[in-house]
Image (spheres, rainbow, N blue to C red):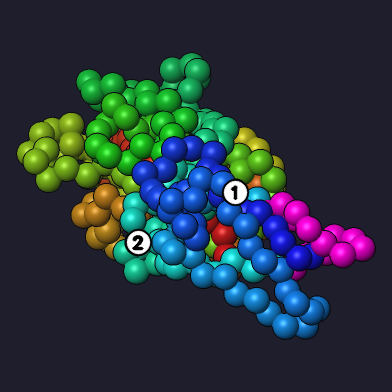
Amino acid sequence: MDRSNIKPSNPFPVPTLAGLILDKLQSEPKEFAGNNDRDSERIHFLNEPFIARYIRMHPTQWHNHVSMRAAILGCPHQGACLPGYFRVNNETQCIENMAYGKRTWTNDRNHRLQKNINDRVKYRSTRETNGDSSLAVDGIEEPVEWSKCATIDNYFVDKPLWMVDLGRGKNVAGVMLRTWHEISNSSSSIYRDYILNLNQYNVYVDHYPRRNHFKNTNLCSYITRTDQTLTSSSRLHFQCQQPLHGRFVYIEANGISYRWNKLFTAVLCEVFVYEQ
């Protein structure tokens, strides 16, 4: 191949210099020269970096037949992650959130009124606790408010579950959970019950949807209130001991058994699933 045009594109608007390659004053398609022979490399450097998800290459001149081998050299992205991407921590690069915009399900909806094991009627919180399950994968992280988060509780089931369908089998390496945590509300009875009654989160990976029971081999990781992060941090990280292959990711919440009010609510503001 002798020459080719290159054009970057994004599926959504990005406030970057996406069109500035080679020459800022050049409005025609950006054209690169090809190799002089099949073995030597030819590297083209750009005047300014650009951000794009797709890069289209169009051969325009060649000998006999078209053949091309190309590589893209990039710089680490320092700005905010684009929708559907996130950072595990401040030191890592943006990676794909496999749960973003996917279908979700919970097991605590549309059940008849039940009683707990001790036949004591559970009193539901006066605060609204029916946040739709899809709110956990809508990509909205800020502000962290109860009304903008998915919620599950044990009003009708002993172990409430939230599930996301990744679309196909993936090698899940870990899950990040953004939950509701406000120091300013620590004195309110609603927030106090929410914090004190919630005991543990379990994360499972499975090949089947709408499960209520899991094998130990399906367990990715768990966090209990003894880890302190459960009640002191709004960002919880569940890192699998080894990658687990599956299509469906579950978050199970468990409550404290020794309090008189046994109703608990798990607040899932945003769920991030990543692979190895």
- Taking depth in this image into account, of 49 and 186 the one nearest to the observer is 49
Q: Which residue is mark 1?
A: 29
Disc 2 marks a residue whose amino acid type is Gln
Task: Verify whether residue 115 appears in magenta.
Answer: no
Visible residue check, residue 252: no
**Mark 2 or mark 1, earlier in chain:** 1
Q: Residue at position x 18%, y 31% from top?
A: 190
Q: Which residue is mark 2?
A: 78
Q: Residue at position x 62%, y 57% from top?
A: 31
Q: Position of residue 83 (x, y in %)?
A: 44, 43
- Taking depth in this image into account, of 171 and 96 the one nearest to the observer is 96
| Image-based side of 119 in relation to 165, left or right | left
Figure disc tally: 2
Mark 2 surroundings within 10 Å by alpha-carbon count, few (fewer than 14), some (14 through 19), many (20 or more): few
- Rendered position, 75 above or below 203: below
- Taking depth in this image into account, of 94 and 52 the one nearest to the observer is 52
**Secondary structure under badge 2?**
loop
Visible residue check, residue 209: yes
Disc 1 marks a residue whose amino acid type is Pro
- The main secondary structure of the magenta stretch is loop
The residue furthest right is 64
| Image-based side of 259 in relation to 199, left or right | left
**Secondary structure under badge 1?**
loop
Image quadrant where one finds the N terminus: bottom right
Say which of marks 2 and 1 sits in front. 1
Q: Residue at position x 27%, y 58% from top?
A: 229
Q: Which residues are magenta?
A: 57-69
Res. 46 mark: none
Q: CA distance from mark 2 to mark 1?
A: 28 Å
